[in-house]
Image (cartoon, helix red, strand yellow):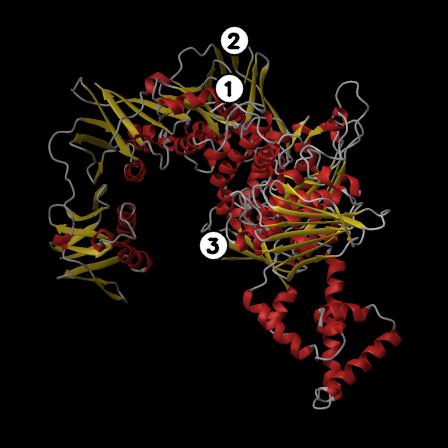
Amino acid sequence: MPIARLDAHLVNQIAAGEVVERPASVVKELIENCIDAGATRIEVVIEEGGAKLIRLADDGCGIPEAELPLALTAHATSKLATAQDLAAIDTLGFRGEALASIASVSRMKLMSRTHVAEGGAVVEQNGDERTDVRPVAMAPGTVIEVKDLFWNVPARRRFLRSAAAEYGQIADTVNRAAMANPDVGYTLSHNGRKALNLPPGQSRRERCVAVLGKDLDDALLEFSFEGRAGDGTGGDEAPAEPPRVWGVAGEPSVARATSKFLHVYINGRPVKDRSLNHAVKEAYRGLMAGDRHPVAAVFIQMDPRLVDVNVHPTKAEVRFREPRMMHGLVRSPLRERLLESDITPSVVPAAATGVAGAGSGVGGAPGVGGGIGGGGARDFVSAFETMEPNQKGFVYEEVKRAMAADDLFVRESTAASAADLAAPLDQADQAAAATHTAGASGVTGVRVLQVHDSYVIAEDVDGVLIIDQHALHERVMFEAIEQRILGDGADLESQRMLMPLVIDADAARVALLDDAGPLLGRLGIEAAAMGPSAIGVHAFPSLLLSRGVEPAGFIDGLLGRIEEGDLSGSADALESESALHRVLDMMSCKAAVKAGDRLSDAELAALLKTRDEVERSGSCPHGRPTTVRISLRELEKLFHR
Amino acid sequence: MKVICDRGALVSSLGLVGGVIASRTPKPVLTCVKLTASAEEGLVLEGTDTEVSVRLTTPRVEVAQGGDALIPADKLQQIVRESVDATLTLSTEQDVARIVGKDSKFKVFGHPPTDFPAVTTFTGEADFTIAAGELHRMVAQTLFATARENSRYAINGVLIERTGNKLVVVATDGHRLALARGLCNTDSKETRSAIVPTKALNLLLKLFDDAEETVHVRVEDNQILFKTDQAVLGANLVEGNFPPYGDVIPKDGDKKATVATDALVSATRRAGLLTNEESKGVRMAFTADGLTLSSRAPEMGEAEIAVDLVSYEGDAVDIGFNPAYVLDALKVVDQSEVELELKGSNKPGVIRSGPSFLYVVMPVSLQ
């Protein structure tokens, strides 16, 4: 076959292969256009998972009639004029490929009207056939209809998954875009059913909560950080704008099994960046089990010159000029925020919620205003407390009237009902008083109980604490050893061996010792090859020895983990610190009291005392919780009080 | 069988034999003590856990009728201990034992004596004999240094090695090693060694407390037997190879200090007060002017104690030791002065007390 230049339409179809993978990518490209056009409302209509129809309408700046045909041409864009612009991209799109690519694999109808134009104009493209521009009546903005996606590329069409699956991807895309732009309103409907309605002008947090789920509202911690001006600039260019980070992060208790709920944005663009995802996970290190993933949305605003978005056709990947700085920028503020909050998970027994529902049905007197029925008795009581006396009187009368209407008040004696109303008040007062005297947190008193030689039960001002003795002690040991190694900069004290302890090992493991030597040294382990298939241990931490940890088993396990690549013994600073942490995990786990160990009262008291002193005592080094709390309120619910 | 016993003597004999009898075992006969009465030997008590066995003759017994019985040891022991009489009459009929005092009658159900596992008896010539006092000293000076539940089973026991009439007892846990030397009586010139379980030697210390007695020792198959006129102690040997202890005793210690045992004990105890689990080490700084012990526990405090040295030769040296290891050795030293031999801060230290006791202790890293 002779070499021939491809015609423009074929070129566009090939480009579409990169950009337009599936309906969701069409939606992504079109939403980016809407945002770049300054839209305040974006309406997305989907039919049959986007295979039949994708329709986006916005109220953005619109396209002048004369430029409409050009908009459908490849490498035509209004977002970029010079090569300098490419180095500092501040719009979501810039390649000028999207519309042309999409148009080449669908039946597209593009309608637009600028704010100054008298009326709109429409142009349609069907494969490589394009109509003339015709006038059309419409509000200012742009409407794009993409019908029969991939009608002329049957191979692609066959690869589309079920409508539900494709729609799921579209919804994710819209959600991701919606979080980045809280001041833009979004609606999404599928097969005529409205699926999403986000009003314009929401705050960043409101938008994140709306997208991530309202039930997470209480569990989302906000964090932010502002870099110094000039952070990360290189050379003699104009100083870079300081990077800003803002985000919400779910407490470890709401962690998920997949990383789908981790969203990272650079300059409003959702990105998938391994290093930034890693930074978020690192912030949770030790607070969350290793196989869980945090719920978080992280927004980074930074000088566009310091990030290259022109790496990937769909711009999902980016390159940073200073990846290490970006890592720290995300990790540090998030970790600080997580450490400063009380993340002891509360227990709401499944049965209790049902009971509570029934309880509020009785006590909450249906028909009384939202203040009682909605917020729960405790909320009502605290609201009641803050009222002026005349307000209280009014509310009391209101309650009486409502109860009378339900024939409750008249059946029981007035005095009894009044006492009922007063009782929770007293309780609330007492609870408030207790809070004042005992301080904000901390275990009160010394009343502790060890059950099944594994769990410790204690109380604090909010309720009952159930502590996993092994997990807590492991955390305490971990902090002590870590403090010694990282804080004091000292190596762990090691006891030398009278004669080297010989461990059988294959050649690969023996070879590992060269790399792992420095790491082991900091931990007080001195080991060296003894011939080709054995390792001699010359020194071992006295802490582990005194806890009855067998050096052979420990080092065998350690080398096994290094071998599996689970932790690297290399000298890389970042890697070796986390490797050190993982070995400390192992050490503290081995050295800590086990479930099943009976503890004396003095030991229990000492353990609980350290709980208050130790940072991150809420979870063990593996991230399992050390402590769960059953709040007084939950207890009261359980007992129908 | 019927015997009349002195209660006090029986209490202490049962106490000794009870030391080997397991209180919980799936085989009930192993919780029993076997009693054998005869005109020739008087009353003999036997107990075993199948690894270690004891055979002990009870003094001050009048045998009215010979015979044997197998009775739960802890019950018999409790009854005899709680009784108030000076003498008790012990009789058995079939598998039932009756213990009768002036105001009391006990009936205890036992087992058929034939169910009791055969306990190896001391037959044949002794390999060597030794004064009980000397054997007692050598075991006491080493036993504490054994490992506990180490996966190298050999060092959970104590090595007894004889070359001609020279006897060496060695124990180690991998971080320190204690060695005692002594002499025994034998015609043999050969070298023999055996690793003895600690349980047997703990019992030996209680059993052979009369320093003047002579202990006959014999090793056969996988057993070692110790015999005096009253008692026979038998034990299965620990299998495996004891580490070559000669290799780990340093001979190049060029810094030698002599110090009063009491002063070093006191100073080490005091310095040990300010150590904790992660930071156990006590620093010992030796100079010609004296010894300074110091310790530091993070977030707790520091200690410093000065000790006079009787003599010192060599350069100054700093070395860290786990104080517990040092004290263990000083406790069994029977002389008023000890010698310390050192080489460097990460080289083993040696404590000597005369020619008969030597202790190697490995240092801990100093910060």
Mark 2 closeness class: few <14, some 14–19, many ≥20 residues within 10 Å: some
Image coords of residue A279 (percent x, y)? 63, 36
Image coords of residue B211 (percent x, y)? 29, 32
Q: Nearer the viewer, mark 3 or mark 1?
A: 3
- The kind of residue on which mark 2 rests is Gly
Q: Nearer the viewer, mark 2 or mark 3?
A: 3
| Residue receiving disc 3 | A453
Describe residue B210's horizontal placement relative to residue A288 as left or right.
left
Mark 3 closeness class: few <14, some 14–19, many ≥20 residues within 10 Å: some
Marks 2, 1 in one chain: yes
- The kind of residue on which mark 1 rests is Val
| Residue receiving disc 1 | B259
| Residue receiving disc 2 | B314
Tell me the chain of label 3. A
Q: Nearer the viewer, mark 2 or mark 1?
A: 2
Residues at marks 2 and 1, CA–CA distance in whole angstroms: 15 Å
- The kind of residue on which mark 3 rests is Asp
Mark 1 closeness class: few <14, some 14–19, many ≥20 residues within 10 Å: many
Describe residue B319's horizontal placement relative to residue A378 as left or right.
left
* Residue found at the very far bottom of the displayed protein: A411
